[in-house]
Image: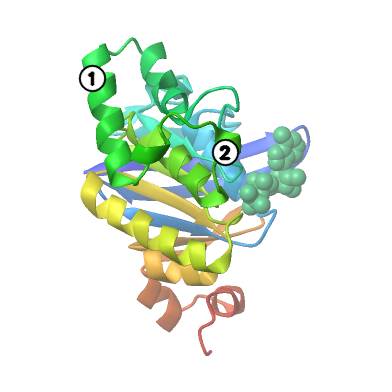
Amino acid sequence: MTALTLTNVNKSFGNVHVLKDITLEVEEGEFVVFVGPSGCGKSTLLRVIAGLEDASSGEINIDGQQVNLVPPSKRGIAMVFQSYALYPHLSVRGNMTLALKQERQPKAVIEERVAKASRMLNLEPYLDRYPSELSGGQRQRVAIGRAIVREPKLFLFDEPLSNLDAALRMNTRIEIANLHRALDASMIYVTHDQTEAMTLADKIVVLRDGRVEQIGSPMELYNNPVNQFVAGFLGSPS
Ligand code: ADP
Ligand code: MG
């Protein structure tokens, strides 16, 4: 079963053509990494999938349903931003429960989901703290927890580790891989870091200047890059 299908998706801002005929599939449960240099359109592509931007043309299908006109909150997607985007005036618990309250989930459901997510992410001691009282790594875990409690079928991560130091980045990368195993969800993970792409992905989508250059497993791309750009970017020898 295919979780997400994009067919010839284009996005322009005015006369700036940012996404060019993007066609790709994400299978159910798959961990897909979008990799490419800064400015190639990775964040725009995630925002179009999430519905935060409308596609200029092309089709977006989630679980077999065309969602081009479906609002973000109804797409079954949760997005984790590079900047964390936590609400500073809300506690960790408040940040994690806000979307669920807006969905009018019963109190017992909200409590159970927060308990489960905070256990998975080791956030239990911090539930009553505010974002300003947390380290960068803890804030990032809250941002991930806020996505998990919504129980989405598809997670979108936009360079979630780029504001963390190297050691923390490695730990958090392992945590995200563990979450993927535990959560029975599909994940799209955007990075410009080749190592992250090679270690996390079931499938890598290499983007360049708004176009898909190549799609394949880490080994396929490493062993058979279609061109010098992919080879150079993923560090393969040819
Ligand atoms: P990446 O995430 O790969 O670094 P982005 O998706 O942020 O790339 O940006 C791709 C291109 O689209 C850039 O040239 C950027 O300036 C442009 N862009 C992104 N958002 C907008 C916008 N809202 N208006 C105009 N141009 C934009
Ligand atoms: Mg970006």
State whether residue 17 appears in this view. no
Judge the density around disc 2: few (<14), some (14-19), many (≥20) Cα neighbours within 10 Å.
few
Task: Pick the residue in front: 179 or 135.
Answer: 135
Q: Which amino acid does label 2 sit on?
A: Glu
Q: In this view, does 179 lie above or below 201?
A: above
Q: Is residue 175 above or below residue 79?
A: below
Residue 87: give x, y in percent of width and height.
Answer: 57, 26
Task: Pick the residue in front: 22 or 133.
Answer: 133
Q: What residue is shown with label 2?
A: 133
Marks 2/1: CA distance? 27 Å
Q: What element carries label 1?
A: helix
Q: Is residue 86 above or below residue 223?
A: above
Q: In this view, does 121 lie to the left or right of 139?
A: left
Q: In this view, does 157 lie above or below 40?
A: above
The answer to whether the residue bearing label 1 lies less than 8 angstroms from the nearest atom of ligand 2 is no
Instruction: Identify the residue at horizontal 42%, vertical 41% (top origin).
Output: 144
Name of the residue lying farthest toward the right? 15
Kindly indicate the quadrant of the structure image that contains residue 193: bottom right
Residue 71: give x, y in percent of width and height.
Answer: 47, 19
Q: What residue type is labelled 1?
A: Val
Q: What residue is shown with label 1?
A: 109
